[in-house]
Every structure is written in structure tokens, then in C-alpha cells.
Image (cartoon, rainbow, N blue to C red):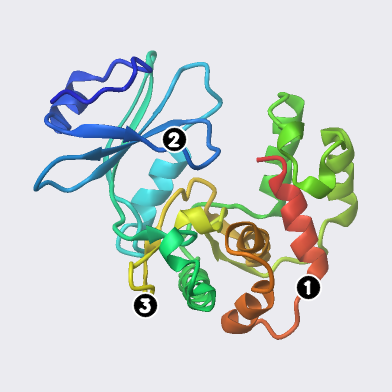
Amino acid sequence: MTVPFNSVLALPPELAALIQGYSSRPVTNGYSGASVFYLYAAHKPAFYLKTATPDSEVIFTPEVERLNWLKDRLPVPQVLYYRQSPAGEYLLLSEVTGVMAYGEAFKSKPAEVVKRLAEGLKLIHSLDTSECPFDSGLDSQLEAARQRLKDGLVDEADFDEKRLGRKAPDLFEELLRTRPASEDLVFTHGDYCLPNIIIQPDCRKISGFIDLGRSGVADRYQDLALAARSLPFNLGPGLVGLLFEEYGLKEVDWAKIEFYQLLDEFF
């Protein structure tokens, strides 16, 4: 059966051949701006297809580059097909099997989920960064935030509740004022939120990580801050302290937590 994509983009012939016989289901969670489809067929491995129109701000190249580098380093999707064309972008990925960390099945065992999240953080942060080509440090992130502000790409309506009603230029000035004096550099996921962490259904082990387009060498608080924001939203209150404890963080730098959550408003 031909995969229905609601005519968002016409598929390149070679991509259509790869997924011949598959059915599709749109994936509606996430905020990337891309169109994402889950592709499935009997007795065949499932895939994810991401598409973006030419006028979209979404570019898949950073994710493709990072996934190719992370292959054999972390459990991440495999890039099966990627193409940029005047008609748009297309990215076909293998499935990381398991359940997103905020899955309904996990609501009854939040402490176990937190333990898996901490294990995932430690695994990512333990990567050797000596040959990593992806700089996500403060200089590069602040420049990217500045450019997004200049280009009008910062969505003020999507700010966290405590910042709703404020203007992006005001937040950027706050970023510059509160920039940390130092960075504890490790390899980071870049968007370590529960929907991006896949856990085995029995909750005993991490299956893998997805949406790594912002990964790279940065302060470990890049991940800690977004995990601390995502946990209450997706699993409920009272778990952030356990996450830091399981991670092994003896003293929490709350100023960095606030800074990296503020920085994320620009992406």
C-alpha cells in the first residue's frame, strides 16, 4: 500500500521505493516544526520519516551529521536515507524500539524512570569528546540565539509559564547578564527531555535516544536543566532531587539550571 502523507511533499522515487508497502501514522508529539511519520508494515522493521517544506526553518543536516558520528557510540537511530532538494527535505530513520520515558505505562513507577534517565545522562556524558566536531558551547549557542532573535524565529507565545508575556530581546539581555563564568564540558544530548528518551517496556534499561540535532560538546547543565524542566511536566512533582541524586550531583548549581532553561527559550 502506498504511504499516505496528505500531500505535504511528493516523495523522491528512491525513497518511495524504500518504503513501498508501508503504512504511515503521523507523529504529533514534539515541537520541531517538521512533519514526522511512523512507518510500519507486517514482518518488517518500522521506520520514522521526517519531512520539511522549503519554507520551513527546519533543517535536518545537523541531526544527520550527529547521528552518523554517534553511530557505534550511543544507541541512536540509523540514518537510512537523507536528501535535500528544492521540493524540501527528507530523512528516513530506523526505529529505536521501546517506550518514550513519559509513556502511560511508566506513570506508576516514576522513581524507576528517573533512575533510567540518570543512567542515560551518565552514558551520554561519558563519551570521549576529544574527536567530537560538534561545538555546542556557550559562545556558539549564544550566537545562534542572537541570530534566531534577529531572524524573528523566537516564539514568545511558547515561553515557559513563568516567562510568558516577556519579550525575546529582554530575555536575551538577561541571558548575557547571567552567563555562567565557566563551563563543565561533556558531550550533551542538547534536548534531554522525556519524549526524547526511549526506555525498554519493563523500565529496566534505556533503549536509546532520539532528536539529537542539538547535541555536542557543552556544559553538562545543558542536559540537567532541560531534564529538570521536563520531569515535573511529564511525570509530576518531587522527582528532580532524585534525578540529581541518581546522577551523582552532590551540589546543584541552580543558577546554571535557570540559565540553560532560559537559553532554551530561543530554540
> For the N terminus, which image quadrant?
top left
Name the residue rendered at 51%, 42% in the picture: 30
Tell me residue 77's x, y (percent).
Answer: 32, 52
In terms of secondary structure, where does tag 2 sit? loop
- Amino acid beneath label 1: Asp
User: What residue sits right under mark 2 in the picture?
Assistant: 60
> Which badge, 3 or 2, is on the more N-terminal residue?
2
Name the residue rendered at 46%, 74% in the picture: 116
**CA gap, disc 3 and disc 1:** 29 Å
Picture layout, residue 105 above or below residue 55: below
**CA gap, disc 3 and disc 2:** 31 Å
Q: Is residue 119 left or right of residue 266?
A: left
Q: Residue furthest front?
A: 108
Question: Which label belongs to residue 253?
Answer: 1
Q: Quadrant of residue 87?
A: top left
In terms of secondary structure, where does tag 3 sit? loop
